[in-house]
Image (cartoon, helix red, strand yellow):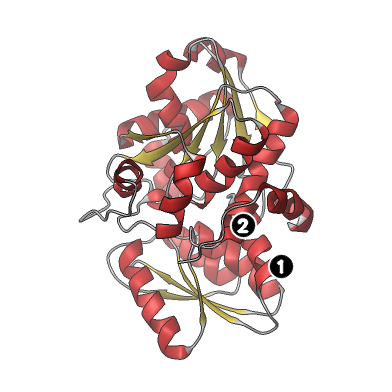
Amino acid sequence: MNIISLSPARIVEAHHLIPPVFVGSALRTSPELDRQLGLSLWLKDETDNPIRSFKGRGTSLFVARELSEGSTLVAASAGNFGQGLAYAAIRAGHRVIVFAAETASPLKIEAMRRLGAEVVLHGSDLDAAKAEAWAFAADKGFRFVEDGAEPAIAEGAGTIALEITDALPSLDAVFVPLGNGALTTGMGSWLRHRSPQTRIVAVAAAGAPCMAHSFEAGQPLETPSADTIADGIAVRVPVPFAVSSMRDTVDEVVLVSDELILEAMRLVRRHLGQVVEPAGAAGFAGLIQKRRDYAGTRVATVLCGANLTPQQIAAWLPG
């Protein structure tokens, strides 16, 4: 496990290393949504970029900061991380092999391949694919890149919080989707430094609670399964580095149901006209669940992904 601590100074540096196409994302508001929730809300929209998720920030920084010429990278992904890694690494002359679950979104699989990644399908979920990816990389002597385990990936994601605090110097809380932990710990590291009064609330899916259990226990705890529509945060084997980093970067972890995630997605569609995937709306779902605790306050969250198939849009966002 990498024991390097996350660094606010490196987050500042990262903002200058990440390609412009991934930074400077919009902060969206809706007066009607504010009235409905009884608070002031800003939504950082990370979906308007070539891969339609925040993952390009961390993967671009990792490639720029960590790699030598001509590396072969192996990773596991539900789709968005793999897209980010392929986008950044292949443009820099590296080879990318991504292992994904046999149940992974066909849209995300096709997007990874379109960006130049070699995609191998294995197992019934992300963590099964990850175990196979790790074994494959070890056998071949390739570089295994684990989302949540690389400080550069988290620090790249931390630039989202840097942009939020530059635009909104006073916030009572920030709600952040929690999967493998890079987004949460990266943003949390910056907020602790720049806005220590801001409460950092990580939001995981109730059907994939391993990171919540790990945070409470202070050590990695696996769960037997991960059962949620939010494939981007469907984790059952926690990343130890992320769990360790959460001790200093997170105040609270809340769990939200798939039904509440769907409600959040529909509210975003109705009030902002934006389509977001379940994992991308998880932070907002956490705020909806806790809104009475934050009545009258200033709150932000991240819309961190928008890769949905037409079938998913029809089923989850009718009309």
Name the side, left or right, on which 46 lies relative to 140. right
157 in relation to 25, above or below: below
Residue 58: numbered disc: 2
Q: Position of residue 70 (x, y in %)?
A: 67, 85
Whichever of callouts 2 and 1 sits on the residue coming sooner in the sequence is 2
**Residue 306 seen in the current view:** no
Q: Which residue is pictured at 71% across the width and 25% down the height?
A: 169
Residue type highlighted by circle 1? Ala
Determine contact: label 2, label 1, CB under 8 Å: no
Residue 136: numbered disc: none
Q: Which residue is pictured at 43% across the width and 52% down the height?
A: 244
73 in relation to 242, above or below: below
Q: Position of residue 119 (x, y in %)?
A: 46, 74
Q: Which residue is pictured at 52% across the width and 25% down the height?
A: 270
130 in relation to 97, above or below: above
Name the side, left or right, on which 245 lies relative to 43. left
Q: Which residue is pictured at 62% across the width and 82% down the height?
A: 71
Quick one: 139 or 240, which is closer to the camera? 240
The residue indicated by pointer 1 is: 64
Quick one: 200 or 255, which is closer to the camera? 200
Q: Position of residue 230 (x, y in %)?
A: 38, 46
Residue type highlighted by circle 2? Gly
Mark 2: few, some, or many residues within 10 Å (few <14, many ≥20)? many
Name the side, left or right, on which 317 lies relative to 189. left
Name the side, left or right, on which 124 lies relative to 171. left
Q: Position of residue 198 (x, y in %)?
A: 57, 27
Q: Disc 2 on helix, strand or loop? A: helix
| Quarter of the rendering occupied by the N terminus | bottom left
Q: CA distance from mark 2 to mark 1?
A: 10 Å
Q: Disc 1 on helix, strand or loop? A: helix
Quadrant of residue 285 within the rendered picture:
top left
